[in-house]
Image: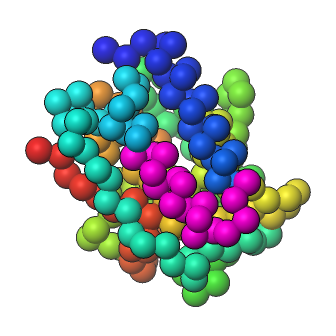
Amino acid sequence: MVNAWEVRDWRSRVADLYAEVRGEAAPDAAHRRWVDGRAALLRDHPASPVPALARASFVPEVAPYDPAFRFKVPVSAAEAARREVPTASDGVVPFERVGRVELPGIGGLDVWWLDSYGGGIFIPLRDASPRTYGGGRYVLDTVKGADLGGASGALVIDLNFAYQPSCAYSSDWVCPLPGPGNSLPTPVEVGELHLPLP
């Protein structure tokens, strides 16, 4: 059973890892740092969502870096919408749509604000690839430190950093998953790919 201090440390380490990623000048070098850092957390950290018996030999499958999937895009206005995601552990988790980003040649994604204590930008993604987790992946989740940067009104969206939510590894975790505005009809075969556990 994961305790609160282990989760706190996990989030702190994730935030530190993304700070290192943002500090790298070359996106491919930043991606290598992220791949190595995330693999170490998933394998070694006590709050890892990977079941304990699978951790020692666990290596996530991540596609090679492809610069065509990195974008710095403006956040455009979008019609207000609210999603309330019921969870077994956290009650109802509310999100407000605060905008939309258009990724040239790929499609658009809704940008959500976690409308509860702490807040944060949240961009999940579901795509048509059979190689990615069917429930979707996360691109940004700033409440947990997963933030690639940007300026006011624009975000760095790099799909090479799309990662599986904790619930992809274990049913002990409950995760908000992408809705229709975060589902793409095309495959996005970069980022963390789905690796079913034994």
Q: Position of residue 98 (x, y in %)?
A: 74, 53
Any part of residue 88 in sight: no
User: Which residue lies at the image location 51% right of the left edge and 28% below the top edge?
Assistant: 10
Above or below: residue 74 compared with residue 67: above
- Find the residue positioned furthest to the left: 198
Is residue 157 positioned above or below 141 on the image? below
Image coords of residue 132 (percent x, y): 33, 63
Q: Residue visible at 28% across and 41% down?
A: 169
User: Where's residue 23, x and y in %?
Assistant: 73, 54
Q: Is residue 118 above or below residue 113?
A: above
- Say whether residue 147 is left or right of residue 106: right
The answer to which quarter of the image holds residue 118 is top right
| Left or right position of 54 against 99 | left
Residue 117 appears in the rendering: yes
Q: Main secondary structure of the magenta part?
A: helix
**Does residue 35 belong to the magenta stretch?**
yes
Reply above or below: 109 against 38. Answer: below
* Residue at 57% over, 70% down: 28
Number of marks present in the image shown: 0
Q: Which residue is rendered at x = 46% and y = 55% of the image?
A: 35
- Could you tell me residue 109's position as x and y percent? 60, 66
The quarter holding residue 130 reads bottom left
* Along the viewing direction, whichever of 81 and 44 lies nearer the viewer: 44
Give the image's coloring scheme: rainbow
In magenta, the rendered stretch is 23-39
Quadrant for the C terminus, please.
top left
Which image quadrant: the N terminus?
top left
Judging depth in this view, the residue of 130 and 30 nearest the camera is 30
